[in-house]
């Protein structure tokens, strides 16, 4: 006997599988399932020391085994460790921090808060010239032959005069005011 499945049933099945895979994905990213005898769970959050903001997607690596995890978007993590492990917490733009698990108080295993400092690099102030040095720039500036030539785009040079017209930039309100003022001067009875 052949069973016929409608398109609607296929849609519900594939949608349910896709939804379940998306819902379970964040949990897999947060906990490594390497539980073995002698290991215990540490939970916590990585934050910026100066601002107190959470640091999303910070990396936590166990230096002895090379395994590690990435924090979620709120900076939270959960990882199985043993007393002899050393954790290295790092993220872009911050100084990495090394923590020995043996130094962590057992009362804070589930509320561990790790603060990272920003990695600040101070650079000297520099000036960039389009020439090799300041002397070449001065020489090119003083020897320029097109100093007095100014091209204003949108204004055509005059046809019968050697005098370049002065660009008059006004806003629409000033234009209307000038127009009304001219009519009022010509006709004193003019009312706008």
Image (cartoon, helix red, strand yellow):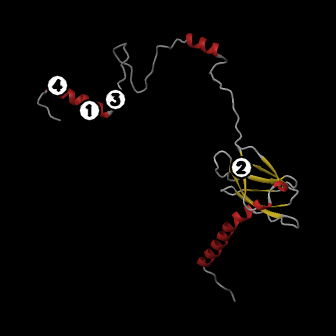
Please say if 119 is above or below 44: above
Q: Which mark is residue 185?
A: 4
Say which label, 1 or 2, has the lower sequence index: 2
Say which label, 3 or 2, has the lower sequence index: 2
- Tell me which residue sits at (64%, 49%) in the image: 52
Q: Nearer the viewer, mark 2 or mark 4?
A: 2
**Percent coordinates x, y for residue 133 in the rendering:** 66, 17
**Percent coordinates x, y for residue 178 in the rendering:** 25, 28
Res. 143 visible in picture: no
Work out how far the residue at label 1 is from the one at label 2, CA to CA, in angstroms. 62 Å
For disc 2, the marked residue is: 115
Please say if 92 is above or below 174: below
Say which label, 3 or 1, has the lower sequence index: 3
**Percent coordinates x, y for residue 120 in the rendering:** 70, 37
Q: Say which element carries label 1.
A: helix
Tell me, yes or no, whether the two marked residues, 4 and 3, touch with CB atoms within 8 Å: no
Work out how far the residue at label 3 is from the one at label 2, CA to CA, in angstroms. 56 Å
Please say if 56 is above or below 3: above
Tell me, yes or no, whether the two marked residues, 3 and 2, touch with CB atoms within 8 Å: no
For the C terminus, the quadrant is top left
Work out how far the residue at label 4 is from the one at label 3, CA to CA, in angstroms. 21 Å
Using the image as rendered, state which of residue 164 and residue 192 is in the foreground: 192
Q: Say which element carries label 2.
A: strand
- Tell me which residue sits at (67%, 66%) in the image: 22
For the N terminus, the quadrant is bottom right
For disc 1, the marked residue is: 176
Tell me, yes or no, whether the two marked residues, 3 and 1, touch with CB atoms within 8 Å: no
Could you classify mark 4 by the number of other residues whose Cα lies within 10 Å: few (under 14), some (14-19), or many (20 or more)?
few
Res. 90 visible in picture: yes
For disc 3, the marked residue is: 170
Tell me, yes or no, whether the two marked residues, 2 and 4, touch with CB atoms within 8 Å: no
Say which label, 4 or 3, has the lower sequence index: 3
């Amino acid at each position: 006997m052949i069973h016929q499945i409608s398109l609607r049933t296929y849609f519900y099945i594939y949608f349910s599988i896709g939804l379940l895979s998306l819902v379970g994905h964040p949990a897999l990213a947060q906990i490594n399932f390497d539980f073995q005898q002698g290991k215990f769970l540490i939970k916590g959050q990585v934050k910026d020391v100066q601002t107190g903001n959470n640091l999303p997607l910070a990396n936590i690596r166990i230096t002895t085994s090379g395994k590690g995890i990435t924090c979620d978007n709120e900076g939270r993590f959960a990882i199985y460790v043993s007393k002899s492990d050393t954790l290295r917490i790092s993220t872009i733009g911050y100084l990495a921090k090394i923590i020995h698990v043996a130094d962590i108080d057992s009362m804070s295993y589930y509320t561990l808060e790790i603060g990272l400092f920003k990695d600040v690099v101070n650079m000297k102030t520099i000036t960039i010239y389009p020439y090799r040095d300041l002397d070449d720039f001065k020489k090119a500036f003083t020897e320029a032959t097109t100093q007095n030539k100014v091209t204003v785009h949108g204004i055509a040079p005059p046809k019968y005069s050697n005098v370049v017209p002065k660009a008059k930039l006004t806003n629409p309100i000033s234009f209307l005011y000038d127009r009304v003022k001219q009519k009022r001067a010509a006709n004193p009875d003019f009312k706008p």
